[in-house]
Image (tube, rainbow, N blue to C red):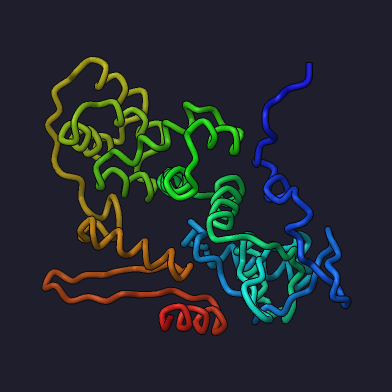
Amino acid sequence: MTSSKKPALGKGLSALLENASTDITSKTSKEAVLGNIALISVSLIEANPFNPRTNFEVEALNELADSIREHGIIQPITVRKVGVDKFQLISGERRFRAAQIADLEEIPAYIRVANDQAMLEMALVENIQREDLDAIEVALSYQRLIDECKLTQEQLSQKLSKSRSAITNFLRLLKLPALIQIGIRDGVISMGHARALVSAGDEKQQTKLFQLTVNEHLSVRQLENIIRDGIEVNTKPVKAKSTSKNTDLSLDQDQFKYALAEKISAKVEIKKAPNGNGKVIINFDTETDLNRIIELLNN
């Protein structure tokens, strides 16, 4: 029996870009040469504003840059044409950033046509499948696909080749208190702990159990047993340094930090002193990256 299930998108962008008519890659002639790869000047490419990944490890990028210097770029990036001699990244931001570090003048790329919604979907799906996002970044990406690309959980399940329950489990993380979400993001607790906390009662009880888990280094099984047995929890607040560098930020300030990081595709830090003074830090890897950020902030 032939299955009627739609092809999943878990194998990368090839499944998203099956329609050859969206390929405008060309060589020297004016006619489109479908399925080919073009060499594009790195200086003509701008970062993808829809990329959910905002934190790129410098050491890992430098290692990739060393590999690129020695072997070149094996897997082309994918871009869309947004103007005369101007392109915007759809996928492959790690390769693009590493190519900048390696001082490459040109980079191999597939050129596609995509509107903003299609581009958002491509970027989110590509990153969910291929990048090491933390659980909160994954959950936010799922929510954006549902809200901005008008997908149901069932459609999202089919596109990502993941079970409906797996999608639901990630989305439920976004209902946890902000303190716990930060703890998940920073790796203070595991996904197993987070799933247990989701069903642990109201926000006050969830926060108490989170604090107990961190303070007592509880395993997932121990936490589940406490929740199952309904044991009364009395805990001391989690120390700020145990959860996040930015636990002194309000939820609005933390959300602003991530919104800015997403807009400029760079890591953003906000540091506050007890007297209220502080600074906003925008991290960049190369002078080209800095110029890209300046241009985005000036727009």
Front-most of 108 and 215?
108
Please indicate whether residue 130 sits to the left or right of residue 201 in the image. right
Quadrant of the image occupied by residue 196: top left
Question: Residue at 19% of width from left, 35% of height from top?
Answer: 203
Please indicate whether residue 234 sits to the left or right of residue 217 in the image. left
Front-most of 137 and 216?
137
Front-most of 25 and 93?
25
Q: How many marks?
A: 0
Question: Residue at 68% of width from left, 78% of height from top?
Answer: 42
Quarter of the picture holding the C terminus: bottom left
39 relative to 222, above or below: below
Quarter of the picture holding the N terminus: top right
Question: Residue at 66% of width from left, 36% of height from top?
Answer: 8
Front-most of 221 and 148?
148
Question: Residue at 26% of width from left, 47% of height from top?
Answer: 178
92 relative to 171, above or below: below
Residue 49, position as x, y percentages in the image? 50, 65
232 relative to 62, above or below: above
Quadrant of the image occupied by residue 233: top left
232 relative to 35, above or below: above
Please indicate whether residue 260 sits to the left or right of residue 41 in the image. left
Quadrant of the image occupied by residue 217: top left
